[in-house]
Image (cartoon, rainbow, N blue to C red):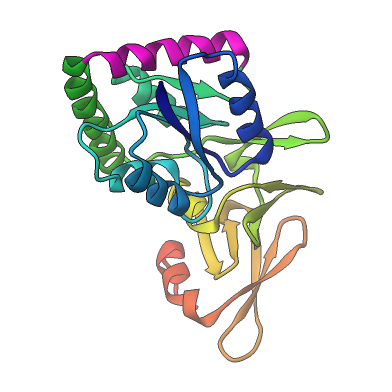
Amino acid sequence: MIRAIIVDDEPLAREKVKLFVQGESDIEIVDVCANGRDALASCHKLKPELLFLDIQMPEMNGFEVLGKIKMHPLPGIIFITAFDEFALRAFEFHALDYLLKPFDRVRFKKAVSHAREYIQSNTQSETTTEQIKSMLDSIKQTPARLERLVVKANGRIIFLRIDDIDWMEAAGNYVNVHVGSESHLVRETMNNIEGQINPQKFARIHRSTIINIEKVKELLPYFNGEYKVVLQNNTQVILSRSYRESFKKILGKPL
């Protein structure tokens, strides 16, 4: 039996993988994890041969989990992602398999078949381990730049162009993305999103706020060294003192 762990922060996604695994007689689910930290501990304890690994998770994403796993060779990895163009290109380049949400049973079986071949071949295990390490190195060296976000809402899948976003605010384990008169919740952290968007176009002006610089209409002095940032749609957000210097460098002008 192939011992497998499922790692995904979305309950429905975890249940879907568990359901599809029931059709694979040689795979046994030994643990199901909802976050990266639990997944890392479970891998070191249970030593799985196969890992269904979500990429976009708050606090510790799938890449960070993979980079910290102390197993050699690494288990077979089937990456799971809702949307990450850069990651998909990396997987394809390094010949590793992934499941793009929402995936169906046919695509699932293909990915499992690929992973099964990897697990059954010691030679391929060594080769694929090096492929994974190479992929992680390339991702670290070439930061991804998001071009759009995919949001699931009311049974719809909405594609948001990054350049259309006015501003974003933290909302627990989510980020509330504001585009015109609409707002959308994205299951992501501010730090993860900040690391993937163009720093010449977006600025963090508060611990919980990121703005599109091109959407700024004016700055109004507030108090204690803070400013009100007025966007083109007349939304007002606060530029805190701790982010004033970094914002000044982006503008290239004194405040």
Q: Position of residue 22 (x, y in %)?
A: 59, 19
Question: Is 107 left, or right, of 229 in this rendering?
Answer: left
Question: Is 249 left, or right, of 211 in this rendering?
Answer: left
Q: Please identify the quarter of the rendering in which residue 2 is found.
A: top left
Q: Please identify the quarter of the rendering in which residue 143 is found.
A: top left
Question: Is 123 left, or right, of 103 in this rendering?
Answer: left
Q: Please identify the quarter of the rendering in which residue 90 is found.
A: top left
154 or 1: nearer the eye? 1
**Residue 230 to residue 225: above or below:** above
118 part of magenta stretch: yes
Residue 47 seen in render = yes
In the image, which residues are magenta?
A: 104-121
49 or 64: nearer the eye? 49
Q: Quadrant where the N terminus lies?
A: top left
Q: Residue at x 60, y 67 (%)?
A: 208
Spot the residue most to the front: 1
**Residue 171 to residue 1: above or below:** below
Q: How many marks?
A: 0
* Magenta part, dominant SS: helix
**Residue 147 to residue 95: above or below:** below
Q: Position of residue 138 (x, y in %)?
A: 25, 35
Residue 201 seen in render = no
236 part of magenta stretch: no
Q: Position of residue 239 (x, y in %)?
A: 59, 74
**Residue 20 to residue 32: above or below:** above
Q: Residue at x 58, y 44 (%)?
A: 9
Q: Residue at x 48, y 57 (%)?
A: 191
Spot the residue most to the bottom: 224
Q: Residue at x 54, y 57 (%)?
A: 190
152 or 122: nearer the eye? 122
